[in-house]
Amino acid sequence: MTAPPRVLTVAGSDSGGGAGIQADLKTMLALGTHGMSVVTAVTAQNSVGVQGFWELPVEAVRAQYRSVVDDIGVQAVKTGMLASAALVETVAELIAGTDAPSVVDPVGVSKHGDSLLAASALDSVRSKLLPAATVATPNLDEVAQLTGVEVTSEDGLRRAADAVLAYGPQWVLIKGGHLRGDAVDLLTDGSEEHVLRAPRHDNRHTHGTGCTLASAIASQLAKGQSVPEAVMAAKEYVTGAIAEGFALGGGIGPVDHGWRFR
Ligand SMILES: Nc1ncnc2c1ncn2[C@@H]1O[C@H](COP(=O)(O)OP(=O)(O)OP(=O)(O)O)[C@@H](O)[C@H]1O
Ligand SMILES: Cc1ncc(COP(=O)(O)O)c(N)n1
């Protein structure tokens, strides 16, 4: 048997299974790739919030990464929750030294408003992590936190993209999921521009959308697609997963990673 394309997620564990490492690995399976993981932090989390989290030591993150990359190898890397400045800097250095495209989801705050990144790590995200990204995928809250640019309508997406590109990622995908109307995202490398538009699904069970989208992009890149092709395919996958998001627990349920199998 030929091995499927190999994709690595560097992110936090979500005990509820909707976001983080768990969302990433399910997405990778659904898109036909072999998912591998470097755990950066363990969260105690469910449908109503994040009850606590514990970071792993920098050495544990570095060791997991080396174990995977030095033996198995990777065709794309995705980063998610990195928790602290020390972990952001370590992971930025690791991905910059890896010969594979990287998708950086600069996770700041969970859907419930719980912080997953120390305020003291923002400078390292700007100066070390974003420059190492092939594609950065901030949502509008993360754009505001990182660049100070506030966007309240589709017209502002380009301004947000320019502000993030100034930190050096090759491409940026600004996610407009928190606006009203259609779910519109903007992908650009500063010269080429693609507007990705999907109908908004009136479904509150959207836990894990950002993790799912970034992992889907990484999976498509590992299969050899270009950045625009990978992002378009990933947008189609996440839109279907949001349409089928289901209730679990008393709060916000997860998107359905397995929607294409049902
Ligand atoms: N209700 C919805 N219907 C359709 N698409 C949506 C909806 N909400 C978000 N999206 C899309 O989902 C993707 C993720 O965007 P979003 O802005 O939710 O990211 P995020 O805030 O990082 O996610 P998360 O909440 O997991 O952190 C984007 O492509 C966005 O347009
Ligand atoms: C470990 C981990 N990583 C990322 C998110 C963001 O996802 P969401 O915004 O859907 O809560 C999360 N809640 N937990």
Image (spheres, helix red, strand yellow):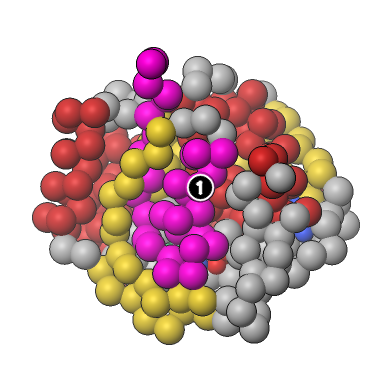
Q: Which residue is mark 1?
A: 26
Seen at 56% across and 49% down, the residue is: 212
> Can residue 139 be seen at all in this image of the molecule?
no
Seen at 29% across and 59% down, the residue is: 40
Residue 196, image x, y percentages: 76, 38
Start-end of magenta stretch: 1-30
Q: Is residue 16 left or right of residue 149?
A: left
Residue 64, image x, y percentages: 19, 47
Residue 80, image x, y percentages: 42, 53
Q: Quadrant of ligand 1?
A: bottom right
Q: Is residue 159 left or right of residue 103?
A: right
Seen at 65% across and 54% down, the residue is: 256
- Tell me the kind of residue under disc 1: Lys
Q: Secondary structure at mark 1?
A: helix
User: Assess mark 1: CB under 8 A from ligand 2?
Assistant: no
Q: Quadrant of the N terminus?
A: top left
Q: Is residue 7 magenta?
A: yes
Residue 21, image x, y percentages: 41, 54
